[in-house]
């Protein structure tokens, strides 16, 4: 088939993969379309973690012979036994003659192994079709293997002059209810939210997904990671009121305010680290703890003290700004918290990835250059 045809069917596979949104963590979103005689004869997508993979679902759903057909799949099929048997074996057994893959799997257990096995079994393989779109679909999955750390998203609601609060620290509400509802969908995209004890104490937020339409789609609430060096968060805080939600409290092993673990519900985990310095935790400790629990996509919701630390450490991979057409003034708190640059060449430059209106607000997504 020509490149235009391949792109057409791969785009259908990518759109299909999106149907698994919110439910596959920590696995990637994957879609598969099987075509024979220029006609789609079957399709499938990864519906939930530990569920059947997209390739097997498409193969099992087909009502006709797959011999001589072409499979379009957004990610290289798995080559190892995990929660399911290897998809590459199912493809070979089905007599599919050609496989078009958007992107190779970064997981070393898979990377190019399936591609080579397909070729060794006489199957024609094409890779790199709509690759950038497929990688964006699973950016945190790719990031984990390429950088050995979680993908970090920093979210703020700000005024048009960049403020998150006025000089009295009043911040409710700068952005609209529509923006706050949209934030719920962004929380559902990640498998963890990271915050600080100051944010919990000052705002007493739930930091969960409450919008019914979104809540009905998710398998689990995202885990919550809280930095609390001195264990100051009250046990009555709203963050502990979401049922069956993993809450990880990272605290200083030297603090003298240790509460008995039995004070918390069974879904609360206390992690002691010895790298707190002036109240700041070593980011590597956060990464290691997150990796232990397969939390590879983290949304950060915090005040500007912690965001300043993150920005100075170049730890933010994606900025999610909800901008309201309001002016707060010079004495307000900026979202970055960083000191003014003395020379323009020292500025931090980002790349705009997306701009989208949300009623009277504006959503701006920015990435590292």
Image: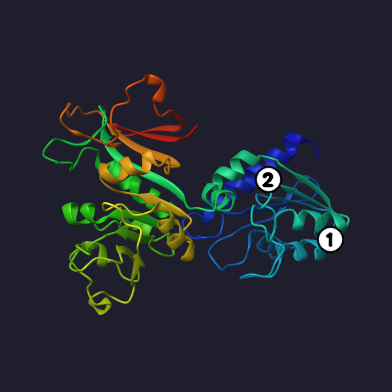
- Residue 305, by quadrant, is top left
Please state which of residues 296 and 251 is positioned toward the viewer in this rendering: 251
Contact? badges 1 and 2 (CB < 8 Å): no
Residue at the image position 77 percent from the left and 61 percent from the top = 91
Which residue is most to the bottom? Answer: 262
Label 1: which residue?
95
Question: Quarter of the image containing the N terminus?
Answer: top right
Q: How many marks?
A: 2
Res 96 seen here: no
Q: Secondary structure at mark 1?
A: loop
| Disc number lying in front (1 or 2) | 2
Above or below residue 285? Residue 364 is: above
User: In the rendering, at what x and y percent does residue 81 appear?
Assistant: 68, 70
89 horizontally vs 175: left or right: right
Residue at the image position 81 percent from the left and 47 percent from the top = 37
Q: Secondary structure at mark 2?
A: loop
User: In the rendering, at what x and y percent does residue 95 appear?
Assistant: 84, 60
Category of crowding for the residue at label 1, using alpha-carbon neighbours closer than 10 angstroms: few (below 14), some (14–19), many (at least 20): some
281 horizontally vs 175: left or right: right
Please state which of residues 14 and 262 is positioned toward the viewer in this rendering: 262
Residue at the image position 35 percent from the left and 45 percent from the top = 182
Which of the two discs, 1 and 2, labels the residue nearer the N terminus? 1
Label 2: which residue?
102
User: In the rendering, at what x and y percent does residue 345 appear?
Assistant: 41, 21
Above or below residue 263? Residue 143 is: above
Residue at the image position 69 percent from the left and 59 percent from the top = 110
Res 249 seen here: yes
36 horizontally vs 319: left or right: right
Badge number at residue 1: none
């Amino acid at each position: 088939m020509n490149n235009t045809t391949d792109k057409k069917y791969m785009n259908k596979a990518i759109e299909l993969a999106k149907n698994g949104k919110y439910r596959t963590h920590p696995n990637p979103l994957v879609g598969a379309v099987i075509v024979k005689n220029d006609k789609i004869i079957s399709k499938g997508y990864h519906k939930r973690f530990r569920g059947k993979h997209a390739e097997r679902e498409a193969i099992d759903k087909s009502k006709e012979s797959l011999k001589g057909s072409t499979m379009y799949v957004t990610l290289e099929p798995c080559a190892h036994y995990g929660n399911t048997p290897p998809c590459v074996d199912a493809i070979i057994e089905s007599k599919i003659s050609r496989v078009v893959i958007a992107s190779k799997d970064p997981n070393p257990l898979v990377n190019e192994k399936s591609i080579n096995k397909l070729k060794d079994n006489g199957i024609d393989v094409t890779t790199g079709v709509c690759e950038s779109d497929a990688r964006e679909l699973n950016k945190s999955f790719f990031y984990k293997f390429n950088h050995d750390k979680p993908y970090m998203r920093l979210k703020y609601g700000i005024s048009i002059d960049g403020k998150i609060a006025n000089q009295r620290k009043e911040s409710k509400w700068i952005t609209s209810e529509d923006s706050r509802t949209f934030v719920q969908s962004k929380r559902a995209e990640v498998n963890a939210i990271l915050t600080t004890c100051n944010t919990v104490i000052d705002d007493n937020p739930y930091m969960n997904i409450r919008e019914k339409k979104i809540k009905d789609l998710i398998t689990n609430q995202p885990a919550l990671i809280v930095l609390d060096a001195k264990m100051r968060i009250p046990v009555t805080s709203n963050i502990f009121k979401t049922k069956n939600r993993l809450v990880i409290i990272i605290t200083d092993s030297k603090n003298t305010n240790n509460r008995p673990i039995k004070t918390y519900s069974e879904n609360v985990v206390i992690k002691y680290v010895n790298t707190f310095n002036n109240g700041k935790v070593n980011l590597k400790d956060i990464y290691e703890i997150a990796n232990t629990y397969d939390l590879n996509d983290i949304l950060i919701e915090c005040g500007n003290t912690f965001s300043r630390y993150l920005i100075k450490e170049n730890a933010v991979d994606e900025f999610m700004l909800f901008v309201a057409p309001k002016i707060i003034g010079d004495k307000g708190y900026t979202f970055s918290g960083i000191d003014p640059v003395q020379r323009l060449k020292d500025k931090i430059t980002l790349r705009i990835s997306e701009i989208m209106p949300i009623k009277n607000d504006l959503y701006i997504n920015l990435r590292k250059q």
